[in-house]
Image: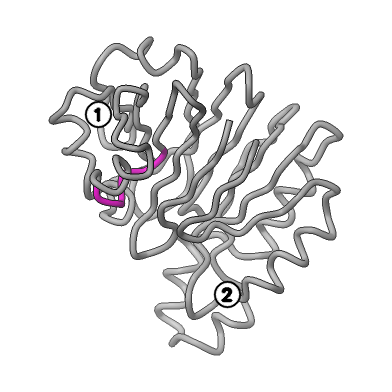
Amino acid sequence: MKLTCLGSGSAGNCYLLHNETECLVIEAGIPFKEVKRALGFNISKIVGVVVSHEHGDHAKYLHEYIKVGIPVMAPSMGHITGALSAISKPFAVRTFPLVHDAPCSGFLIEHQEVGRLLFATDTEYIRYKFKNLNHIMIECNYSKDLLRESYHEGLQERIKLTHMELDICKDFIRVNENHDLKTVCLMHLSDRTSNETVFQKEVQELVECPVYVANKGMEYEL
């Protein structure tokens, strides 16, 4: 099973969890035509799309999936179309609430090839602890020092309440780290208030598994 990133950040978010015959699309913030191209135009392998929340960089192209009858799971938007079993086999998807300025969901995704994968973005923090995670995909949007240097106080406060800071991200990983953890992927890094090299280095110091930073075109084996 591979993870492919077609976009991460305010310009649009989309990730493909896929093998030769199956694909779960995570987030619909990238044009569907780019998803088709990444899959060699074999959209029959798409078992469903899950979307965290209504903001355009995550959900702008959701209607294109609905139009062609692909099952959708976007509970924070009131969308669950198609039979849930169509998404839950071979993928089992469970949701949990996040902390954002719009209703937002994280996902716990299970598959026999992957194990347990956590996906959480656009959230101030995650209030839960999870057992036996094999893969963590988590927002690491900004550092408090870079935020202070980049924006006025009002905007700083809004970002603090809606996105995950480096130290909060590290705390979550530290608490949920286990000997079966195989990969960590840092997502939704801000162009202005993050440092990819530093963020990756600091998180790598916490875990023994590889740490990746989601950028367009990134792909790795799970």
- Identified by mark 2, the residue type is Ser
- Front residue of 90/92: it is 90
Quadrant of image for the C terminus: top right
Q: Earlier in the sequence, mark 1 or mark 2?
A: 1
Name the residue: 49% across, 52% down: 123
Magenta segment: does it hold 162? no
Residue span colored magenta: 26-31
Q: CA distance from mark 1 to mark 2?
A: 33 Å
Q: Residue furthest left?
A: 67
> Which dot marks residue 79?
1
Q: What secondary structure prevails in the magenta region?
A: loop
Report the side of 152 relative to 220 (left or right): left
**Residue 127 location, x and y as percent?**
61, 42
Q: Quadrant of residue 8?
A: bottom left
> Which dot marks residue 194?
2
- Identified by mark 1, the residue type is His
Magenta segment: does it hold 29? yes
Name the residue: 56% across, 59% down: 164
**Residue 64 location, x and y as percent?**
17, 38
